[in-house]
Image: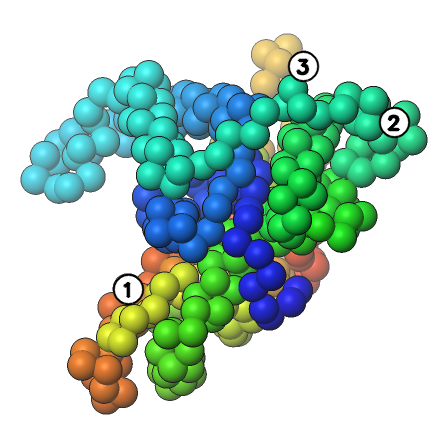
Amino acid sequence: MSTELESRLVFVDTSAYESKNYQFNEHALGKLCDFLESERLHLLITQITINEIKAHLLSKAEESARAIKKIQKEAMFLRNTPELACHGIFEKVKAEDVYKIALEKFEEFLDKSSAEIVDIKNVDASIVFDKYFNSEPPFGGANKKSEFPDAFVLEAVGKVSRERGHTLYVISDDGDMEKYADTLDNLIHLKRVDDLLDLVVRKEEELKEPVKFADSIFEQLEENLIESAREIISSSEFYSDEANEFDDEIYQIDIESVCINHKNIISVSDEHVEYEIDFEIVLKAHYSIADYDRSPWDPEDKVYMFVLHNDIVKKHTEVFSAYVNIDYMDGIRANAEVSELDFTDSAFELNEENSETISVKYLDLSGE
C-alpha cells in the first residue's frame, strides 16, 4: 500500500462498515464522517449499498434483542442486585427500537457526510454479465450469482471515477472486491477505513509535526500499552469458533506474548492522538471438551448416562484490535499518558485455524 494519499474520492463497502460494528459516530467511522463533512474526503455510495446496510442493521438488531433475552434468562439471579449497574440488562429491549436508533445514526452519517448516491441505472449491464460468464472479479467461487449486487455497485462507482479523472479508494474486507480493484488502474483497494484515515492525516501539511511528535510519544508509551493490553486480555472472556457453547468451556488462558504489529492514526492534535492498533497475542488456551464418542448412551431412555470430557491445550496466535487515546497536555512529552485503551470486542474469539494442539488428555468420570 502506498504511504501517500492519491485521491480524496472514496467508496466504502458494507463489509468495511460491518468490521467497525456500524458505529457511525465513533472511532474510525466517526472520524471518517468528520473528514467527509470538512470536505477532506468525498464519499460515493449506491442505493444497493444503503439497502444492504439497512438490512444488516435490522438483522443485527434482531440478533442483539435475542441475545439480551437469553442473558436475562441465564442471569436471573442478578435481579437480586438492583444496586449494581448490570441490573439494567433486565430492561425490556425490542428489536425494532434497536433498529430505529441504529438507522437514525446511519441516516445522520449519510446526511453529515454529504454522501453522493451514484445511480446504478447508468451501468452497462452487458459489462457485468460478461464478467459473470467469464468468471472475472468480483465473480469468484461457486456462489457467483450472489456477487451481482457488488458487481453493479463497483461498475457504477468505477464509472464515476473514470469520468471525473480521479482515482477511487475502494475500502472493503471482501476478497472479490479486492481482486476487482486490482484489475483497474483507477481503483485502489484498502482493507480498512483506518488505512485511509491514516493516509489523510499524514498528508495534511499542517499536521506533519504533530504526527511526528505523536509517533514518538507512542514509541515512548509502547511498553506500557502492551502491559495494559495484557492485563485487559488476561481478565477478559474468551470463546471458540469451534466449541459448543453449552458443553465446552475455555477454563484457563495463559498469555505467552503480546506485541503491536500494526497501527494507524485516527486523529491528532497538539495535545492528543488516537490510534487504531492491532495487538498480536500468543497464548495457550485450556479447553474442557465434551467427548460423546466415549460417553455411554442409554438406548432405552435415549440420553447419555453421563458425559465424559477431554482436557485439550491449544496454542493460538490471534490479532485483536483496539483504539488507544493518548493525551500530552500542553504538548509536553513528560505529560504524556494513555487516557483510554478500548478493545473492539468485549469477549475475544479464538479461531481454530490460528491454533495448534499442544496436548490432549482423556478424562474419566472423576475428571482424572
Q: Which mark is residue 130?
A: 2
Could you give the CA–CA distance between mark 2 and mark 1, rounded to whole angstroms?
50 Å
Furthest-bottom residue in this view: 334
CA neighbours of label 3 inside 10 A, class few (<14), some (14 to 19), many (20+): few
Q: Secondary structure at mark 2?
A: helix
Q: At numbered mark 1, what does the secondary structure look like: helix, strand or loop?
A: strand
Relative to 112, does residue 331 appear above or below in the rendering?
below
Residue 191: image tag: none
Q: Give the alpha-carbon distance from disc 3 to disc 1, as whole Å.
A: 57 Å
Q: Nearer the viewer, residue 134 or 80?
A: 134
Question: Which quadrant holds residue 266?
Answer: bottom left
Which of the 4 image quadrants contains residue 87? Answer: top left
Of marks 3 and 1, which one's residue comes earlier in the chain?
Answer: 3
Mark 1, residue position? 340
Image point (53%, 34%), residue name: 45
Percent of width and height locating residue 192: 55, 52
Within-10-Å neighbours for mark 2: few <14, some 14–19, many 20+: few
Q: Measured from the top left, where is residue 6 in percent x and y?
A: 60, 61
Q: Is residue 267 left or right of residue 92?
A: right
Position of residue 46 in the picture relative to residue 175 (left or right): left
- Toward the right, the furthest residue is 134
Residue 77 located left or right of residue 269: left
Which quadrant holds residue 140? top right
Task: Name which of mark 2 and mark 3 comes first in the sequence.
Answer: 2
On the image, numbered disc 3 is attached to which residue? Answer: 299
Residue 107 horizontal/vertical position (percent): 36, 29
Amino acid under label 2? Answer: Asp
Q: Residue furthest front?
A: 164
Whether 225 is drawn above or below 96: the answer is below
Q: CA distance from mark 2 to mark 3?
A: 58 Å
Task: Tell me the amino acid under the disc marked 1.
Answer: Glu
